[in-house]
Amino acid sequence: MKIVLNGETTEIRAETLSDLLAECEFPGRVATAVNEEFVPAPLRNGHRLKDGDRVEVLAPMQGG
């Protein structure tokens, strides 16, 4: 299916948000939102993705 991941159209096989994070190899702790709604980590396994969803994945950055 096609989704928009961090602003870029992407073809994925994942069916859930959790699967997407694994498929795209996002590191450790991240924040996620689907269609501009925050999805907490405990709900990612059950959050099914649909064609056209807009997904944002944000990782904390260090520096200063």
Image: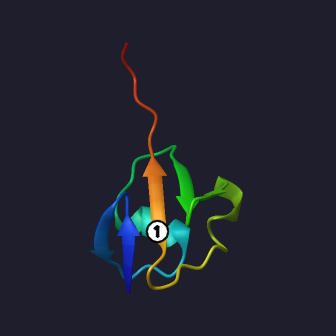
> Which quarter of the picture shows residue 61?
top left
Residue 26 percent location from the top left of the image: 39, 53
> Which quarter of the picture shows residue 37?
bottom right
Image quarter (top left, top right, bottom left or bottom right) of the N terminus: bottom left
Q: Which residue is drawn at 52% across and 43% down?
A: 29
Q: Residue at x 63, y 70 (%)?
A: 45
* Left or right relative to 32: residue 38: right
**Mark 1 secondary-structure assignment:** strand
Depth check: give the residue in front, 4 or 49: 4
Depth check: give the residue in front, 28 or 62: 62
* Left or right relative to 11: residue 27: right
Residue 11 percent location from the top left of the image: 30, 79
Which amino acid, mark 1?
Arg
Q: In the displayed structure, would residue 51 be above or below residue 39?
A: below
Q: Mark 1 points at which residue?
A: 54
Image quarter (top left, top right, bottom left or bottom right) of the C terminus: top left
Residue 22 percent location from the top left of the image: 42, 64
Q: In the displayed structure, would residue 10 be above or below residue 24?
A: below
